[in-house]
Image: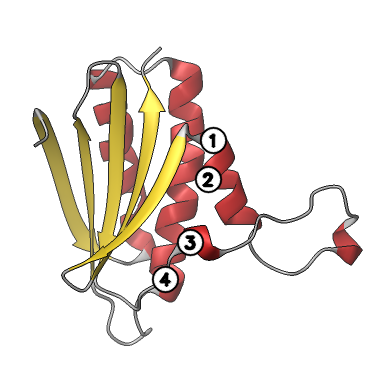
Amino acid sequence: MAQTEKILTRKALLKNLDSFQEFITDCARQYLLPEDRILKLQLASEEALMNIFSYAYPDDAPGDVTVRCFHQKAGELLISFEDSGEAFDVLCVDDPDTTLSLEDRDVGGLGIFFMKQMTDAVWYARKENKNILTFRLSLS
């Protein structure tokens, strides 16, 4: 059980990106995440949110996104993104071969790879018809 938790729910629309990002940044600062880590969290969060906005729901029926900020252990911050869209385990996408030139790489997957690089851990679960993507960041 999370010790403390903050929750924000909005429609999966681009116009809500700023409110989600402000919420995430405020949570990170409250938990004293170092500023360089906050920047990485902002970048990873934007990628996660844009994927939800773009792919989770049909264009004519955007559903909700819930972002949760919490910690279960001292020294770490967890941020989760929940949506009720189509099931999609981002961890099943192979990391791109970044040694290849852009022309030789497969299309897609770079944003997911980027999220993994910007956080300490990423995991996915499908529970009660919801996609739950969680980032873990060390507070040190």
**Residue identifier under label 2:** 115
Which of the labelled discs sits on residue 118, or is there none? 1
- Front disc: 3 or 1: 3
- Front disc: 2 or 4: 4
Mark 2–mark 1 contact, CB under 8 Å? yes
Residue at position x 32%, y 87% in the image: 60
Lower position in the chain sequence, tag 2 or tag 3: 3
Tell me if residue 126 can be seen. Answer: yes
Mark 2–mark 3 contact, CB under 8 Å? yes
Residue at position x 39%, y 49% in the image: 123
C-alpha gap between disc 2 and disc 4: 15 Å
Q: Relative to the observer, which residue lies in front, 67 or 132? A: 132
- Front disc: 4 or 1: 4
Mark 4–mark 3 contact, CB under 8 Å? yes
- Which amino acid is tagged 3? Val
Vertical comparison of 123 with 88: above or below: above
Secondary structure at badge 3 equals helix
C-alpha gap between disc 4 and disc 3: 6 Å
Secondary structure at badge 1 equals helix
Near mark 1 (Cα within 10 A), the count class, few <14, some 14-19 or many ≥20, is many
C-alpha gap between disc 2 and disc 1: 5 Å
Which of the 4 image quadrants contains residue 125?
Answer: bottom left
Tell me if residue 19 can be seen. Answer: no
Lower position in the chain sequence, tag 4 or tag 1: 4
Lower position in the chain sequence, tag 2 or tag 4: 4
Q: Which quadrant: the N terminus?
A: top left
Secondary structure at badge 2 equals helix
Which of the labelled discs sits on residue 90, or is there none? 3
**Residue identifier under label 4:** 88
